Amino acid sequence: MTTNDSLFAAPPQAEQERMIEAVLFASAEPVTLAELIARLPHGCDAAEALVTLRRRYEGRGVQLVKVGDAYAFRTAPDLGHLMHKESVEARKLSRAAIETLAIVAYHQPVTRAEIEEIRGVAVSRGTVDQLIELEWIRFGRRRMTPGRPITFVVTEGFLDHFGLESARDLPGLKELRAAGLLDNRPSFAPSNPQDDDDEDQSGQSELFED
């Protein structure tokens, strides 16, 4: 091996894992694979290091989880109760905001007009602004239809808050019923494929309430 080869050789796999571990531990937000690749030395295989690192943390008090297209360390789900602190939650979403958020999550990308059609009532600007302020929804691409209406999609912050890797991990109708999270008021139904054969179109406006 020449001097130049050794100078630019990638660090050992174990060292790459340590680097990624350090970056994720220090970051307040999930870090994408592209960001990790940009930070690591030339020649590192960040994707492979992430796979190994996730395996190392299986069964531990903290786990390396995927949030959308990014990665972060999070408390193991079964230990979450240890982190709870008794306090009064001053800000609680209105029913309109809960329903709007659920519609966006299950039907994204969705326009304001489509949200209103599903809910059966107009969506106020304040409701949408609140969800955007919480960073749970964001603007998506414009539809290639007359007027080119803007669409809404959920954010990685939404996925992270509810412990989801992607919107595909949202519970289906049967799971919501089993958990007692559906009320009897007709509203809207998620478009999850596993529930296409379910004729009951009950709403899930209680989905995100404490």
Image (cartoon, grey):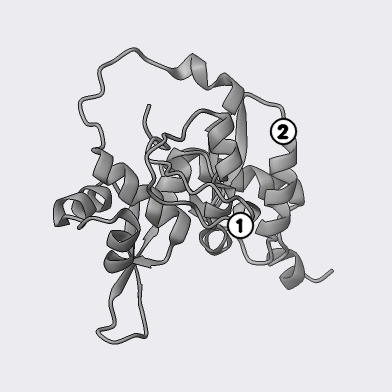
Say whether residue 32 is left or right of residue 153.
Answer: right
Nearer-the-camera pick, 71 or 3: 71
Q: Nearer the viewer, mark 1 or mark 2?
A: 1
Label 1 secondary element: loop
User: Seen in the image, is 134 located left or right of residue 203?
Assistant: left
User: Which residue does the image show at 27% across and 65% down from the upper left?
Assistant: 112
Please tell me which of labels 1 and 2 falls first in the chain: 2
| Image position, residue 20 (x, y; %) | 60, 47
Q: Quadrant of residue 196?
A: bottom right
Residue at which label 2 appears: 58
**Label 2 CA crowd tier, 10 Å (few <14, some 14–19, many 20+):** few
Instruction: Give amino acid for label 1.
Output: Asp
Count of numbered circles in the view: 2
Expressed as whole percent of the image width and height from the top left, the position of residue 51 reads 72, 49
Residue type marked 2: Glu
Residue at the (20%, 25%) spot, across then down: 90
| Position of residue 167 measured from the top left corner of the image (x, y, whole percent) | 52, 53
Give the image location of residue 18, x and y in percent. Answer: 64, 42
Residue 155 visible within the image: no
The reply to whether residue 51 is visible in this rendering is yes
Residue plotted at (66% across, 57% down): 46
- Residue position marked by numbered label 1 in the rendering: 196
**Is 148 above or below relative to 182?**
below
**Disc 1 vs disc 2: Cβ atoms closer than 8 Å?**
no
